[in-house]
């Protein structure tokens, strides 16, 4: 079977585009999103994210990602974050994620019925030890289940600001 030069050009272009799309950012330590069945987040459905920190000489940015329906009823969403350090110590914090402006304009990118927002919860954070950090995140609103939440995720990336 003989292949034409166009075949090789198209094949090469396709492979190049695919490799660019799947290549990852070397600064990203963790990026994971969890989808909710029926677009509802129940108290018992805590999401767990594990970031393996290999370099304690740099700072990191920690961001949370929310995809919600345009019909979400509130401007914000409270979450509870339980962090477990490599040595087993734990820290718990309640975080307010602001999803819209006071005038009702959604933050983030909205298209059709979906709004996507990535919210920095800690900029230039440092991790004191090498190892696995486990983040268990649950919704902490007064309503259960919390409707119109489609997915929730976490991103940990190296900061471009040098550690002092």
Image: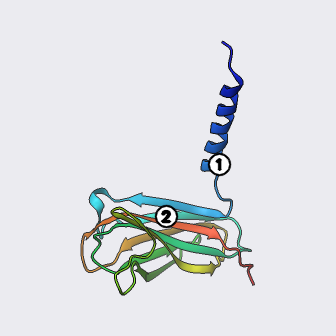
Q: Position of residue 105 (x, y in %)?
A: 38, 79
Q: Nearer the viewer, residue 78 or 114?
A: 114
- In the rendered image, the quadrant that contains the N terminus is top right
* Residue 147 occupies quadrant: bottom left
Residue farthest bottom in this picture: 102
Q: Nearer the viewer, residue 105 or 38?
A: 105
Residue 20 is marked as 1
Q: Which type of secondary structure does the marked residue at label 1 adopt?
A: helix
Q: Position of residue 36 (x, y in %)?
A: 34, 59
How many numbered markers are drawn? Answer: 2
Q: Position of residue 103 (x, y in %)?
A: 35, 85
Sequence order check, earlier mark of 1 and 2? 1
Q: Which residue is mark 2?
A: 49
Q: Which type of secondary structure does the marked residue at label 2 adopt?
A: strand
Q: Residue at x 63, y 44 (%)?
A: 17
- In the rendered image, the quadrant that contains the C terminus is bottom right
Residue farthest top in this picture: 1
| 45 lies above or below 10 | below
Q: Nearer the viewer, residue 56 or 104?
A: 104
Instruction: State the CA–CA distance, disc 1 to disc 2.
Output: 26 Å
Image position of 48 (left or right of 38):
right
Of marks 1 and 2, the one in the foreground = 1
Image position of 39 (left or right of 3):
left
Q: Tag 1: Cα neighbours inside 10 Å, few (<14), some, or many (≥20)?
A: few
Image position of 113 (left or right of 93):
left
Q: Residue at x 30, y 56 (%)?
A: 37
* Residue 3 occupies quadrant: top right
Q: Tag 2: Cα neighbours inside 10 Å, few (<14), some, or many (≥20)?
A: many
Q: Position of residue 43 (x, y in %)?
A: 30, 70
* Residue 138 occupies quadrant: bottom left
Q: Residue at x 75, y 78 (%)?
A: 162
Q: How is the image coloured?
A: rainbow
């Amino acid at each position: 079977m003989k292949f034409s030069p166009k075949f090789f050009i198209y094949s090469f272009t396709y492979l190049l585009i695919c490799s660019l799309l799947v290549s990852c950012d070397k600064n990203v330590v963790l990026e994971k999103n969890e989808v909710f069945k029926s677009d509802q987040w129940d108290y018992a459905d805590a999401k767990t994210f594990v970031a393996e920190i290999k370099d304690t000489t740099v700072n990191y940015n920690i961001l949370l990602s929310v995809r919600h329906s345009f019909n979400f009823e509130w401007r914000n969403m409270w979450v509870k974050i339980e962090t477990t350090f490599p040595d087993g110590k734990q820290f718990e914090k309640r975080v307010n994620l602001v999803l819209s402006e006071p005038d009702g304009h959604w933050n983030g990118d909205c298209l059709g019925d979906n709004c996507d927002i990535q919210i920095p919860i800690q900029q230039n954070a440092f991790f004191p030890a090498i190892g696995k950090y486990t983040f268990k995140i649950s919704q902490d609103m007064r309503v259960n289940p919390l409707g119109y939440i489609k997915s929730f995720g976490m991103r940990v990336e190296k900061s471009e600001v040098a550690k002092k």
